Image: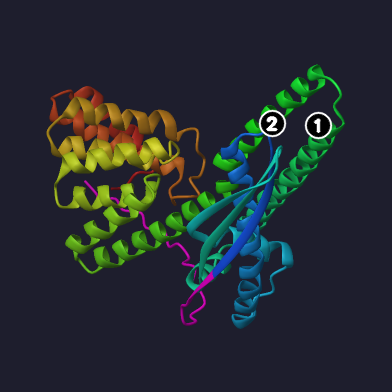
Amino acid sequence: MKKFFTVLIMSLLVASTVNAEIKTYEGVGEYLMSDFETFDVAQQRAKQRAEQSACEQAGVYVESRTEVVNAQVKHDEILTMTSGILKIVDVKFKREFVDDNTTRIRAIVKANIDSDDINKWLAKDNGERASLVEQNEQLRRANAEQDKQIAALKQQLADAKTQQDKAQITQNFAAEDKIFRSNTQQDRVQITQNFVTKDKISLSNKKYELALTFLEKGDSRNAEVFFGDAIELNPNNALAYGARGTMNYNIKDYKKAIADFNRAVQLDPNWIQMYLLIGYSYYGLNNYPMAIANLSKVIHNAKNFSTDKKYGLTGHQLTATAYYNRGIMYKAIGDYERAQADFDRARRLGYNG
């Protein structure tokens, strides 16, 4: 039986190599809270303004660093990049009463910018960067629109004549607070989450490439370590599961191989070769029924793929290989009639293994 191993060469992003440094900025934001607003939301509104202040200061530095690495980056991307990589390390609040109905909330934030994060951003492809900029712009517009709504509600409150009007305005404030909480807890961190997630995926791919390098040198111990790192960074890295499974198959650790191959095909149902390798692995465990079942999956599914461009084999080749090897399985259990039928099908499809 032939060993099967497909290696995809993936391009690695190389960040600009400039000396790393960390800059710290302090931002201050204030919010005037009326009696009809909740204290926790008022604090968060003040904190948001303080973060914006720190972000604007840090943006000047970020822009200067992009010039150092000769990158042409527009102003809106500078703002997105800065908000995505700005790390808040400390927040303090102060409160003072302005009058009987108004309280001033002041937030002071301390935030860091790491130049390495700028380089990581610039290493991203243009499409990903454009998507993050659009998300940031949508959030900025939503925040600006809500600021207008709050200002309008406060004016309505000042003009309110009846308790009924004030009660309605209070309800409107509560509705706006609910929207703000949602934005604060979800949308405002989405850009940073995407940044971290994409960063992990990129690093996972690099770990995968390193694992392949060790595997080519015959160093399965280090290969296993880096395959594990790749999967830990990105549990959806089907290639890492498939390659690690192949490594385990080659050292005859068939149970581990089956687990990796099954995970790979769960993540990428179009990777029909995985069923072929699962079949081979069950054959190695002398579990012929399971081997036959998985090779039958290849035969059933491969006909739907005229060419598997992603992984290099055509559906025709996969079908022929599966028929031949399923014939071996049938022969092993003494079903010579089915075995010969599969061998004949394989030869008609051009199998010459």
Q: What is the secondary structure assignment of the residue under circle 2?
A: loop
Q: Nearer the viewer, residue 308 or 262?
A: 262
> Residue 301: horizontal and vertical position, in percent?
43, 31
Distance from Cα at disc 2 to Cα at disc 1 = 9 Å
Disc 1 designates what residue? Answer: 157
Image quadrant of residue 184? top right
> Residue 294: horizontal and vertical position, in percent?
29, 31
The answer to whether residue 275 is above or below residue 110 is above
State which tag comes first along the sequence, 2 or 1. 2
> Residue 317: horizontal and vertical position, in percent?
40, 44
Span shown in magenta: 1-24
As shown in the figure, which amino acid type bears the numbered disc 1? Leu
* One can see residue 267 in this view: yes
**Residue 15 falls inside the magenta stretch:** yes
Image quadrant of residue 70? bottom right
As shown in the figure, which amino acid type bears the numbered disc 2? Phe
Q: Is residue 331 left or right of residue 309?
A: left
Contact between labelled residues 1 and 2, with CB atoms less than 8 Å apart: yes
Residue at image position (23%, 31%) is 291
The answer to whether residue 265 is above or below residue 136 is above
Q: What is the secondary structure assignment of the residue under circle 1?
A: helix
Q: Is residue 340 left or right of residue 345?
A: left
Residue at image position (14%, 46%) is 253
Dot 2 surroundings within 10 Å: few (below 14), some, or many (20 or more)?
some
**Residue 184 falls inside the magenta stretch:** no
Dot 1 surroundings within 10 Å: few (below 14), some, or many (20 or more)?
some
**Overall secondary structure of the magenta stretch?**
loop
> Residue 256: horizontal and vertical position, in percent?
19, 42
* One can see residue 127 in this view: no
Instruction: Name the residue furthest front.
Output: 100
Disc 2 designates what residue? Answer: 36
Instruction: Name the residue furthest top.
Output: 164
